[in-house]
Image (cartoon, rainbow, N blue to C red):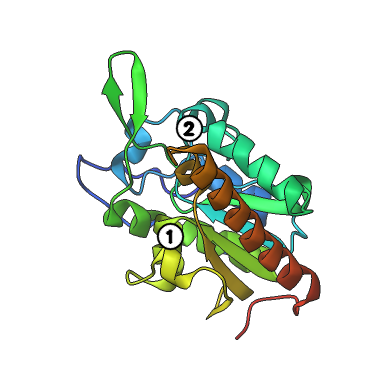
Amino acid sequence: MPAAPRRSSASGEHRLAEPPGGADLEGLRAAAAGCRACPLWKSATQTVFGEGPAAARLVLLGEQPGDREDREGRPFIGPAGRLLDRALAEAGIAREDCWLTNAVKHFKWVPRGKLRLHQSPGARDVASCRPWWEAELRRLQPRALVCLGATAAQAVLGRDARVERDRGRAHATPHAAATFVTAHPSALLRVPDEASREAAFARFVADLRRAADAARDGPQGAPG
């Protein structure tokens, strides 16, 4: 399977990614490894593609890889990933039954001494990477899609999407039979006091349970 064109991208220049038509998930993964559609590849260690079973009924879409994900090439394995694992377990969801991926496939960061600090992707970063997660979802045809955080929610539902307003119910999208919005697990890590953190975690688990019910009971495949 040929890789996506490795076109050079000058600083600030963005293009749409070009997933190969007809590729399966492994073909998409191989192609994404060579993506140069936006400048983020220059400072990232590698592309971090989605992972999980090809028959996954539930897809979790986050923002972008973090520092550890960038170094190891797997999504959701850092602190936010560990919290997500705990929430999935409490919601009765096996991580290995889900497809986990991100709206942006390269780590965007700024240096602070020896640290690499997360920097939120811009609208052009998200737009450039959109064809990758859309291609993933076309191959997966999940019953339920969960947008973790504002970046993912706005990528899927549009720029007006808001986590607090739009969580708690299913949304109609072309990408899954039911689409849900919830907080990103990294946001829960930033909640300052224990009582608020426990309440936020309980809401997060409830959102995941709702999505799991839809994945279990809803029709397979995206509408339309």
In the image, residue 19 above or below residue 40? below
Instruction: Between residue 97 and residue 167, name the one nearer to us.
Output: 167
Element carrying mark 2:
loop
Q: Is residue 171 left or right of residue 64?
A: right
Give the image location of residue 183, x and y in percent. 49, 55
The residue at 61%/65% (across/down) is 145
Instruction: Between residue 195 and residue 87, name the one nearer to us.
Output: 195
Give the image location of residue 146, x and y in percent. 58, 62
Amino acid under label 2?
Gln
The quarter of the displayed image where residue 81 is located:
top right
Mark toward the start of the polypeptide (2 vs 1): 2
Give the image location of residue 32, x and y in percent. 51, 46
Q: Is residue 111 left or right of residue 217?
A: left
Q: Quadrant of the C terminus?
A: bottom right
The residue at 65%/60% (across/down) is 206
The furthest residue to the front:
195
User: Which label is found at residue 130?
Assistant: 1
Amino acid under label 1?
Arg
Q: CA distance from mark 2 to mark 1?
A: 17 Å
Residue 1 seen in this snapshot? no
Give the image location of residue 69, x and y in percent. 53, 32
Element carrying mark 1:
helix
Instruction: Between residue 137 and residue 176, name the one nearer to us.
Output: 176
Residue at numbered disc 2: 46
In the image, residue 184 above or below residue 156? above
The residue at 62%/62% (across/down) is 207
The residue at 46%/55% (across/down) is 149
